[in-house]
Image (cartoon, rainbow, N blue to C red):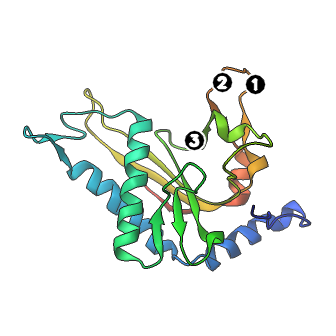
Amino acid sequence: MLKSPYIGHPEEEWLNITQQLVDDFPLSRDDLIFLVESAWDELFSSSLGNSQLKIGQDIFLPAQATGVILEKLIAVILANDYSGWRGGQTKQEKDIIFINNEHYSFEIKTSSTKNGLYGNRSTGHRSSDRTKYRTGYYLLINYKLPKEEDLSRQLWKIRFGWIDDEDWLGQNKPTGQQASIGAKLARLKLITLKYYQ
């Protein structure tokens, strides 16, 4: 289990710590932007079946399905273009694994809102018998999905940084299906790599 790099530091130092974490990461900011943009382009240049149905023209995926496919595409592009990386293969692993040093393995979160940062219900649930710890690096992708009445699509924002397990807050209702972190923590612990107008 990773230890938070923010422990023992006052909040006013957190943004500088985040900047250092991102600077120390084995992939550059440009590398991360390239991965997201390449996966995004591949998603919408893909076609399905003999009928060659196009995503975003003939098939309109919900946000959750889009996120799953983007994660897989990022993992494949990383494994093909950068040595030492692979996609997570079990529920216990992070979404992306850095084989040489697990400290740099990271999670991917996507949202079809401009600024949203959400995890599923289990992200905000902490129990002694859980199988996955989520403290560590995160790649966040916000995008606009095409719909039948509006085929336009675009990336809105790519962010990268560090989120600790305890940063995630589950919904109060026991049936709530989302967890999130507050806007203040997002500003201190995530760096915007690219903002698309």
Taking the spot 76% from the left edge, 25% from the top edge, the residue there is: 172
Q: Nearer the viewer, mark 3 or mark 1?
A: 1
Return the residue nearer the eye: 23 or 75: 75
* Amino acid at pointer 1: Asn
For disc 2, the neighbor class at 10 Å (few under 14, some 14 to 19, many from 20) is few
Residue 80: % across, % down: 34, 72
What is the spatial separation of the Cα atoms under label 2 and label 1, in whole angstroms? 7 Å
User: Mark 1 highlights which residue?
Assistant: 172
User: Mark 3 highlights which residue?
Assistant: 116
Residue 150: % across, % down: 27, 32
* Amino acid at pointer 3: Gly
For the N terminus, the quadrant is bottom right
**Secondary structure under badge 2?**
loop
**Is residue 197 something one can see in this rendering?**
no
Taking the spot 74% from the left edge, 55% from the top edge, the residue there is: 164
Return the residue nearer the eye: 30 or 152: 30
2 and 1 marks in contact (CB < 8 Å): yes
* Amino acid at pointer 2: Gly
Which of the marked residues, 3 or 2, is nearer the chain's N terminus? 3
Outermost left residue: 50
Q: Is residue 148 above or below residue 179?
A: above
